[in-house]
Amino acid sequence: MTIRLFIADDQAMVRQGFGALLASQDDMIVVGDAANGADAVEAVKRLEPEVVLMDVRMPVMDGLEATRQILTSATARDHVKVLMLTTFDIDDYVYEALAAGASGFLLKDATAEELVRAVRIVASGDALLAPSVTRRLIAEVTKRRAAPKRRKSLLMELTPREREVLELVAHGMSNAEIADALVVAEQTVKSHVSNVLSKLQLRDRAQAVVAAYESGLVTPG
């Protein structure tokens, strides 16, 4: 299956460099790019990519607002994944970007192999959170304990096994690792994760991590 990609970054060299690298992959095609968030929003509506590489800081409209608009669009929200690009792994916008629906973060100085791997991970519906980004996310959630009540009530809809799976997801474990830990089939874990996302009305595993910390199911440390 060919992954349709879109690149939004105000640096032409980043767009060209990432674009050339990704287009050279047999399973990827770059359908377009933009130098600011506003142009990205409009182009994504027309081109319908599956993964958008989105810079956080851009003129006219930043990557956060562009991500919100793209992922609330009726035509895009069901299939578009956003991978945020950032220069620093302690970016102040980590929490806001994930809450807006981004599926993960990638540093701009990532290797070619890391970039290609990141795109495939996000395209598959998984989340990409480096340990340093996860620590930053936890710190932000700890300071913003405004939403736990709603999250806690939603957690009551989960079965004990689904809550257990959500906790392991929040600790950064893959489906295979969770399957090993719980001594069940990986397909069973996938079903549990799918149920969790559906019941909590979440887009993907990245938002599941946010929900787990906001609800208090998982606590820092």
Image (cartoon, rainbow, N blue to C red):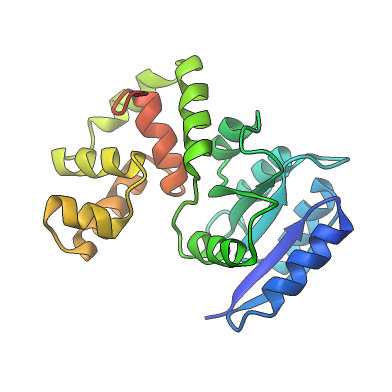
Q: Residue at x 65, y 28 (%)?
A: 92
Image-based side of 154 in relation to 187, left or right: right
Image-based side of 166 in relation to 29, left or right: left
Q: Quadrant of residue 26?
A: bottom right
Q: Residue at x 54, y 35 (%)?
A: 99
Q: Residue at x 40, y 38 (%)?
A: 209
Image-based side of 22 in relation to 189, left or right: right
> Could you tell me residue 45's position as x and y percent?
72, 60
Give the quadrant of the C terminus: top left
Q: Compared to 183, does 164 lie above or below?
A: above
Q: Quadrant of residue 15?
A: bottom right
Q: Quadrant of residue 215?
A: top left
> Could you tell me residue 197's position as x and y percent?
36, 47
Name the residue at the bottom extreme.
26
Between 55 and 44, the one lying in front of the other is 55
Q: How many marks?
A: 0
Image-based side of 1 in relation to 210, left or right: right
> Could you tell me residue 11's position as x and y percent?
86, 53
